[in-house]
Amino acid sequence: MRITSLLSVLGLIASAVAQLPETPRFDLTQPSYDLFRSKKLGGVTVQQSFTFDNVNRRLFVAQRRDGSDTKAGDLTISQLDFSGNLLGSMDLLGCGHGVNIAAQAVGDATYLWTETDTASSGYGQRLWRFEFVDGLTLDSAKDTDIERILPVADADRCTCTIDPVSNNLVVRYQRDSKQNIAVFDLDEATAGNFSTPLADFLIPDLNDLSNVFQGYTAYGNYIYFLLGESYDASSGVLNSQVVSLDLNTGKIAQGPVMTRAGSTLEFREPEGMAIYKTVAGEVRLFLGFASGKAGDRRCNLFYKNALVF
Ligand SMILES: *[C@@H]1O[C@H](CO)[C@@H](O)[C@H](O)[C@H]1NC(C)=O
């Protein structure tokens, strides 16, 4: 009896502290490099987020579907090659804002994890997971046979990213109008097991310039946030920032640090983050920006690769 209660106390303590193996952290003060600039997507609206299938080496970008109301939750997901050429796209109806998306290899196929079941706010209330098929349209109202995923029981809004190096699913979820982060082993999450989060905390006050959240990604025991506004929204002031938090403590590790990546782009709205590990083994922290004119927005991707060991 005493041993059992001791173990349960230890279990409680363990669930509240470090669960993720320590990894190097990106130095956010170091420069960003171009992957590509000014590329066309399947639609003409601003990109919202992007993700890599790191196994099949594919890139996917989410945006609001052309012609849909901003609150309808209709999205277009475009597949691009790493030079930014458009390879295909699919539409998601009534799904969400496209805050963040994640890609997972299943053999030669790519499965995407996105929001679904949009609320009147335009944000998705659940996640779902499906194979990317060029030209296919999924409709949350009709495709009720696709399983709904709610990683945290009392969340009313959620999105996710995949750390392809650590094989973790990282979820940003809203509860009581506050944003939280939870981390799960990707294989367990794919099997529907969300019983044992590796981290779960309320996002602290970031003290950033804009207070506009634009995307996140994770590598090892660190999570990265992209913040800031377009030049249109900020009256031409560059206010894009990046910040890292230690997933094992829930506290800020570095930043917010100003990023000038693509500072000369027209419009330049910070939109999306992702981790990618190259064939040569270099882990990259990607930052996305939308550019161009209304009715002809373009996709721009940059990356940082300097690590602090
Ligand atoms: C769920 O995942 C945890 C690890 O994240 C594991 O310890 C547990 O055994 C899993 N439960 C089931 C029913 O597979």
Image (spheres, rainbow, N blue to C red):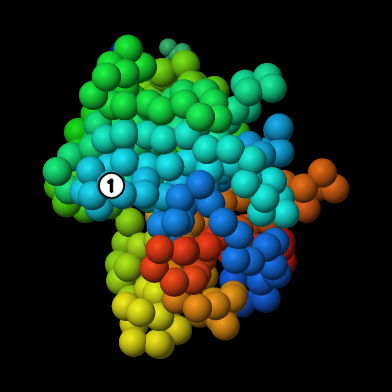
Horizontally, residue 261 falls left or right of residue 226, namely: right
Give the image location of residue 60, x and y in percent: 56, 43
| Towards the viewer: 173 or 309 | 173
Horizontally, residue 122 falls left or right of residue 36, namely: left
Q: Quadrant of residue 93?
A: top left
Residue occupying the point 40% across, 87% down: 236
| Towards the viewer: 255 or 232 | 232
Depicted 167 relative to depicted 201: above or below: above
Q: Please state, as top left, top right, bottom left or bottom right, where the N terminus lies in the image.
A: top left
- Residue bearing mark 1: 68
Give the image location of residue 228, x and y in percent: 39, 72
Say few, some or many: other residues with alpha carbon within 10 Å of mark 1 (under 14 / 14 to 19 / 20 or more): few
| Number of numbered markers | 1
| Towards the viewer: 101 or 144 | 144
Horizontally, residue 253 falls left or right of residue 138, namely: right
Depicted 149 relative to depicted 69: above or below: above
